[in-house]
């Protein structure tokens, strides 16, 4: 059936094809860099990483843009409290975001762009909106007049036909689901950072950032726009209103939104003490791979309930995968090839791919992988698995890990590299051969200290990271 996604705009599952050639033009709303990202944010970014990998696995090239929101109400407030310029303040959290996403093995977008590098482009867009009659000025700020954009509400499927023209909001965060004219350019208040671009000293509103940066790099019509479900209204609705008022063309063809994450069934919040960043979880002894696995394991349109049992189960699942790979790489199998197991591998590939094609059903894809691994382990136990079957079995693992990317352990900083472990193992072997058991034990202890477990098997020494 091919790759298909649920499109928030049409409320349908639709077959996916890019507008131009083989290139997918995609935009993701990036972080507002005033703090460390929490695991709810990271769930949305993990979803777009899985999306990228599946698109590439289906042969598409990617042109993916993500913004860094580095000018915003909370940034101004917190930078002032920290007695830092917004540039020094946001650099800390931009760097932290890059470190956290790298630890989770999230592929970077082709372009990561900062709002403050595009102020001039935003002002140009605001002036064009003004020429087209979509704006009005009040107290030095410029607002978007929603009443002039009749299809407002098309994405969030709300009927805003009765909106009160002239009711304005100029903060970056709304909490009510009512439509109010939103700010495009905010007049400077005392002590706030501001730009002089010929429309009064001020700064852009949050919504105009994304419209401008998306269209600057990706053209007037994007294939895919992703974000957390909380961004659907008003942020994405406002992006559509701005972009389509500017171009008269459809802004985005497929809108994909990832659901919320809760912790132990509750909304994550600092006051409940259940608020976690990746750094918190790693500090508690969890691996980034286990966090990645857990965040990826629930299909993106389902709510994800984060629990510590869940992360334990993710750790166990990864260990099973690694043990299976180790067995395949180190066990000695009988000669020949069992055709039934080749068919089993082909069936596993089919189920795995079909699950991901079905709106990225990661839970089904994982189930297909573990059923196949269970069957293959059984065949290894009974001797039915032959040396000739390892190629297809390895290929399946490669395919699996090109999406889930959890097989290779993260090397702790200061830890031993694979080559260093191998060198120590050779030394231990030589020590044993020379009957220097004291040295051999020392090496084993040294490796154990670094979390390297070694097993002496009839086929030789195996090792793995804990
Ligand atoms: Zn955005």
Image (cartoon, helix red, strand yellow):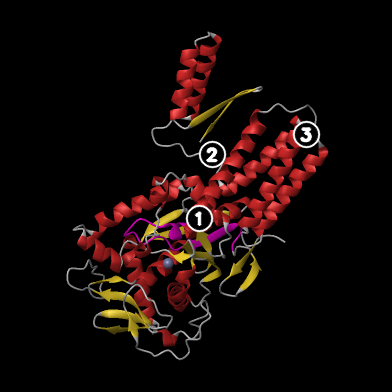
Q: Are marks 2 and 1 in contact (CB under 8 Å)?
A: no
Q: Is mark 1 within 8 Å of ligand 1?
A: no
Q: Position of residue 292 (x, y in %)?
A: 51, 50
Q: Which residue is mark 1?
A: 46
Q: Which residue is mark 3?
A: 382
Closest to the observer: 400 or 197?
400
Q: Which mark is residue 248?
A: none
Q: Is mark 2 within 8 Å of ligand 1?
A: no
For label 2, the SS is loop
Queried whether the magenta region covers residue 41, the answer comes back as yes
- Camera-near label (2 vs 3) is 3
Label 3 crowd (10 A; few <14 / some 14-19 / many >=20): few
Can residue 58 be spotted in the picture?
no
Q: Residue at x 53, y 70 (%)?
A: 252
For label 3, the SS is helix
Queried whether the magenta region covers residue 462, the answer comes back as no
Q: Which residue is mark 2?
A: 408
């Amino acid at each position: 059936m091919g790759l298909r996604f649920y499109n928030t705009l049409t409320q349908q599952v639709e077959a996916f094809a890019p507008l131009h050639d083989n290139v997918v033009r995609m935009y993701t709303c990036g972080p507002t860099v005033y703090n460390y990202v929490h695991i709810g944010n990271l769930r949305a970014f993990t979803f777009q990483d899985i999306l990228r990998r599946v698109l590439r696995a289906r042969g598409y090239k990617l042109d993916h843009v993500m913004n860094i929101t580095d000018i915003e109400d909370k940034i101004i407030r917190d930078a002032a409290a920290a007695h830092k310029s917004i540039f020094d303040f946001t650099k800390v959290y931009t760097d932290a975001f890059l470190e956290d996403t790298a630890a989770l093995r999230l592929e970077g977008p082709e372009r990561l762009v900062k709002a403050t590098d595009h102020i001039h482009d935003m002002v140009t867009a605001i002036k064009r909106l003004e020429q087209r009659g979509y704006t009005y000025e009040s107290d030095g700020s410029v607002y978007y007049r929603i009443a002039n954009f009749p299809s407002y509400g098309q994405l969030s499927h709300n009927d805003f036909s009765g909106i009160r023209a002239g009711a304005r909001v100029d903060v970056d965060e709304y909490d009510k689901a009512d439509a109010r004219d939103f700010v495009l350019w905010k007049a400077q208040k005392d002590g706030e950072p501001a730009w002089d671009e010929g429309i009064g000293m001020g700064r852009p509103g949050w919504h105009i950032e994304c419209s401008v940066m998306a269209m600057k790099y990706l053209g007037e019509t994007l294939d895919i726009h992703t974000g957390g479900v909380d961004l659907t209204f008003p942020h994405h609705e406002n992006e559509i209103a701005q972009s389509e008022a500017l171009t008269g063309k459809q802004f985005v063809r497929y809108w994909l939104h990832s659901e919320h994450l809760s912790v132990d069934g509750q909304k994550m919040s600092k006051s409940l003490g259940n608020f976690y960043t990746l750094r918190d979880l790693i500090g508690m002894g969890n691996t980034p791979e286990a966090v990645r696995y857990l965040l990826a394991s629930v299909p993106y349109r389902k709510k994800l309930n984060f629990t510590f049992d869940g992360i334990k189960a993710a750790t166990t699942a990864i260990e099973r995968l690694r043990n299976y790979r180790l067995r395949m790489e180190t066990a000695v199998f009988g000669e020949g090839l069992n055709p039934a197991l080749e068919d089993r591998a082909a069936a596993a590939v089919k189920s795995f791919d079909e699950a991901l094609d079905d709106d990225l059903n990661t839970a089904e894809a994982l189930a297909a992988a573990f059923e196949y691994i269970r069957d293959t382990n059984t065949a290894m136990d009974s001797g039915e698995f032959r040396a000739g079957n390892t190629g297809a079995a390895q290929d399946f693992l490669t395919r699996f890990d090109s999406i889930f990317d959890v097989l290779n352990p993260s090397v702790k900083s200061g830890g031993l590299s694979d080559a260093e472990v191998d060198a120590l193992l050779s030394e231990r072997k030589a020590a044993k051969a020379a009957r220097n058991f004291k040295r051999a034990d020392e090496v084993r202890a040294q490796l154990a200290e670094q979390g390297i477990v070694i097993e002496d098997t009839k086929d030789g020494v195996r090792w793995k990271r804990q």
